[in-house]
Amino acid sequence: MTTESYNEKTRELLISTQIKPIFTRTCTRTRTRTYNPSTMIFQPRMLATIAASLLLPAAASPRRAHPTADTVASAIAASNAMYENLLEDYENGNCTEIWGELPPKTTSSTARDNLLATKSDEELKGGVVCTCGMTYDMIVSQDFLDEEDFIVVTEEGATNIFSSSSSSKASSSNSETMTKKMDSWIKASTSNSFTPCVGGNAAGFDCKNVDLVAHMPLTDFLIPNTNKKPGQGNDVWGWTSGNNREFVIWGVREGHYFIEVTDFKPVILGYLPSAGDASNWHDVKIVGAFAYMGSEANDHGMQVFYLSRLLDIDPKTDCEDDRYCQIFDEDILYRGTSDYPVRNSHNIVANEESGYVYIVGGENECDGGLHVVDVANPLNPKFKACFGEGGYVHDAQCVNYNGPDTKYQDSEICFSFNANKVHIVDVTNKSNIKIISTIEYDDVGYTHQGWLSSDHSHLIFADELDEAKGFVARTRTLVANVEDLENPTNIQAFLGPTPAIDHNQYVVKATAEGQDYDPIKFKNTDLIYQSNYRAGLAIVQVLDYETADMKEIAYFDTFPLDNGPFFAGSWSNFPYFRSGLVAISNVGEGLFLVKPNLEDALIVPPIITVDNPPTSSPTTYCSDGVLEYKGDEKRGCDWVGEDENKIKKRCRKKSGGVRNKEICRETCGNVGLGKCKDKDKKKKNKKNNRI
């Protein structure tokens, strides 16, 4: 199947012949998802998969499918396995001593025992937030399943499906809660092939302008030495061979899988076990035809794998089991030097242009900073430098700089996300690495990850704990002007439509290969592909970096249960395939392959010409954004401007670390505040001219 045939013919055919969605409902992108379980209608193919044969009596509500005891038992077993994995990670990381005692296992999560909110800035430094804080939070905030929670209603009355007794008492609220949890688990465990996004739904997942190409749940994969499915998913990256074959490298708790996705047809080709213990943190990046893989696992080092080995595998004849195909060994295991050993890492950072890999976080003998490796000869990686002056680096992007700052043109620059700030680092001379400048901002939780704009003029980054600690009510994307690398300025923020925690995000130009949108209309347009945990994948169009004027134009919600500010759901994504395919890794739901369709969703920016000069600056768009002042949906930009006596005061107020004038640009510009304050002068001039 070619990309052209997919876009022009296949999608239309499948849409026109598609059976009704697996779950028929309307769902909007709001703070918390709500839906009526009584409206759910199972598709025949899903009924065959889950054997949902028990039906509720049609007393006062429509009939609905109810999972069998075997299905519920499978869900409970999966829940228990995840709980045990998290406990193991907590113990292996010595987290009881570092972070605190775990409370008893709960299945209700009515109150979040959120130690994240009580930890000091000093305690939140380094990698402890991920290795201990995140694990703790997942344990206490996950809705783990137990037998007594599942009640089935039969003609004889309410009965626990695991008991022959009919005396169990079931509340309707508990029944609906368990129904939602089971619906979520069933969708997370069900394989799906191409399903177009129709009416906001694709195979039971909420969506907008994004089609599902394939969903490969954890149960589609096998760990050979345990004969079990992977514990959890984590990082994901992609590789395109010289003959345009496309491959996904997907990290799981036990190692990495290699999946060919050419022509939108996923085939598992191999599995590389972790070089250390199992860990929920694996990371992979690619330079040329080599993958570089790290992990928080003890004594893992960095694995190097020659990806061209995949080209010679015939899955019809070379696979031992189609759930892993064959077991690989790494080509090289890099462990650093005797002076600078690499025991483990949090992330692998790669600059494909310079041929350097940066091992960051973990125990790399650089205080968790930049451990620099020359991979010009991939099978003989050489230690080059160690830079820990800025302290622990959680993640980074290193580039051959090609932005507006002429002083640093063609220099190699790293943008390092250091837990409570961003460092801009000149790494051109590996013998004289130095920090150029530091970016600090309000309401710091945990500075996590980010990416440069396509023209290297702005830096987009995320704080992983601002939502979890209650600093902001909705997902916050931060933006800094880095046109002058020594003096970054103008920290702005965009608040998304859900309260989900943001994790990894990547910037793609709208006219790049694989996006291919109108090169005239969108030549200066960037798209941000965000993995926002429980809200799944969000695609955000940038209208103006300077004012953080952005809009979510598409999404695919890979976590069906809710959009809350907790650690579960989408971990990362890879949006750089030439075919336009996007890979999404979920913690508990597995691997998703999707195809955005943004032709009708993209907003055409105003075209600036000599005959049509900008009204203020070429990058300022004077329209109101979406405001929910202090989390109140009723207090938006209309509220800011409704009282002439209070408008200026309300414009200056702050919500989620951002002043209202930066969101309500038109409303506040009319009274001379914010980036669009010149609007006020123009209104006065017009009035004077009329006089």
Image: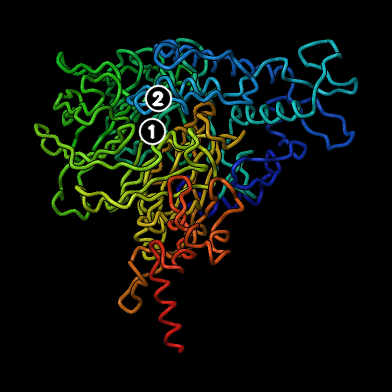
**Position of 287 relative to 619 (above/below):** above
Neighbour tally class for label 2: few under 14, some 14-19, many 20 plus, Cα within 10 Å: many
**Position of 7 relative to 95 (above/below):** below
- In the image, which disc is placed on residue 309? none
Amino acid of disc 2: Val
Residue at horizontal 31%, vertical 37%? 421
**Position of 44 relative to 274 (above/below):** below
Residue 532 percent location from the top left of the image = 48, 38
**Position of 85 relative to 180 (above/below):** above
Amino acid of disc 1: Tyr
- In the image, which disc is placed on residue 446? 1
Residue 652 percent location from the top left of the image = 44, 56
Residue 609 percent location from the top left of the image = 32, 74
Residue 372 visible at all: no
Quadrant housing residue 524? bottom left
- Under circle 2, the secondary element is helix
Residue at horizontal 37%, vertical 26%? 124
Residue at horizontal 30%, vertical 21%? 362
Evaluate if marks 1 and 2 touch, with contact meaning CB atoms under 8 Å apart: yes
Task: Please name the residue that numbered disc 2 is placed on.
Answer: 129
* Mark 1 or mark 2: whose residue is earlier in sequence: 2
Neighbour tally class for label 1: few under 14, some 14-19, many 20 plus, Cα within 10 Å: many
Question: Label 1 to label 2, Cα distance in Å?
Answer: 8 Å
Is 407 left, or right, of 422 in this rendering?
left
Residue 435 percent location from the top left of the image = 18, 38
* Image quadrant where one finds the C terminus: bottom left
